[in-house]
Image (cartoon, rainbow, N blue to C red):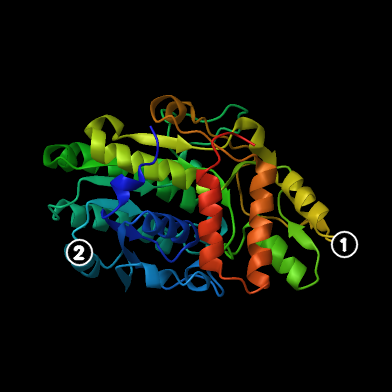
Amino acid sequence: MVIDQQFWNGKRVFLTGHTGFKGGWLALWLTAMGASVHGYSLEPPTKPNFFTVTDLQARLISHTVGDIRDAIALQAAIDIARPDIVFHLAAQPLVRYSYEAPVDTYTTNVIGTINLLEAIRRCESVKAVLNITTDKCYENREWVWPYRENEPLGGYDPYSSSKACSEIVTAAWRRSYFHVQGIHIATARAGNVIGGGDWAADRLVPDFLRALDAEEMLIIRSPKAIRPWQHVLEPLSGYILLAQALYTQCGQFAEAWNFGPEEQDARPVGWIADYLCSKIPGAKWQRNTEVQPHEATMLKLDSSKAKQLLQWSPRLKLEHALDMTLSWFQAWKCNEDMGAYSLKQISTYEQTNYYF
């Protein structure tokens, strides 16, 4: 099973969260294959941002600025787009911010998801839906084994819990409504993504780059915490492949899926910081000794299911993923055409058929 560019050429796609980091890369990839992409999202969350520096709006059929908690506006946008396929990436995506704004986190990640599913239920054109959640939706037991799709859902913090709720909501709409309507819906859980164009707060690589620009030392909260790091194109390739399978092979793929890195790329935060510092002369980091909100120490994903049933697998070793990320930001600083540069990285990734 491979990504079929002819399949995507001309497909009508509704994509929430297209102004975000992952959503922006997904929109760019889909439009490069000829898909007619309609985006629905809040304004870009940072300045600068991937959406703006790649001039992504020029590639979209429509760009609607809206909140997924606004059910009326969301329904109107879906009705206009009449999509074949829906990708749901709009979310409040930050763990630490969820402690500060739990109500916004739950209303966005749960009620927003319900609003979208209800809008889809009223739209006869939709055949396939993919709800992107997170690796943090599992009930984390701090064990060394990677989590599989059949592990219990949970979440210590409001963000993780809200994404587990989004998974449960999706399963309920699948069983209660969509299977009767012939709409095939799945969920996808990825690792900690890195890549060019991410300027979000409280993320390791953007924090590192901000510290460099400010000529300051990088401050790290939990250097021993282990995360499943992966380049953003890795899970996106899984999302595209899964959506294609949902559309062409019907309900057998309508369930939950992990798209994580190889287990050896689940590395401590401190290892990532050391690698980044080794690439920049004079760059250093130190641990933040202040008391921090709870975050999981150990988290890994088991992607055996995707490997066996979708023939999907990671293509980039972590070192290469980090190098690609740094090269993207270097190109941006050199005022290159970042739309063209990002498309070049996608093309290079597509031609990489082995893990290196």
Q: Where residue 154 sits: x, y (%)? A: 45, 39
Per the image, the residue denoted by label 1 is: 282
Q: How many numbered discs, if any?
A: 2
Question: Which amino acid is tagged 1?
Answer: Gly
**Picture quarter with the C terminus:** top right
Which residue is disc 2 drawn over?
Answer: 75
Left or right of residue 83: residue 304: right
Residue 188 location in percent, x, y?
Answer: 40, 42
Q: Nearer the viewer, residue 47 or 115?
A: 47
State which quadrant residue 171 falls in: top left
| Disc 2 residue crowd, few under 14, some 14–19, many 20+, Cα 10 Å | many
Q: Mark 1 or mark 2, which has the lower sequence index?
A: 2
Element on which disc 1 rests:
loop
Q: What residue type is labelled 2?
A: Gln
Q: In which quarter of the image is residue 285?
A: bottom right
Q: Quadrant of residue 127?
A: top left
Measuring from the top left, give residue 233's x and y in whole percent: 51, 48
Pick the quarter of the image with the N terminus.
Answer: top left
Front disc: 1 or 2: 1
In this rendering, would 188 be left or right of 292?
left
Q: Which of 240 and 133 is in front in this view?
A: 240
From the viewer's perspective, is residue 14 above or below residue 60?
Answer: above
- In front: 150, or 327? 327
Q: Position of residue 304 (x, y in %)?
A: 48, 26
Classify 108 as above or below 193. Answer: below
Asked if residue 134 shows in the view, the reply is no
Residue furthest to the right: 282
Q: Do the residues labelled 1 and 2 touch (CB within 8 Å)?
A: no
Question: Badge 1: how crowded within 10 Å, few (<14), some, or many (20+)?
Answer: few
Image-based side of 65 in relation to 118, left or right: right
Q: How far apart are marks 1 and 2 (CA)?
A: 52 Å
In this orientation, does residue 243 appear? Answer: yes
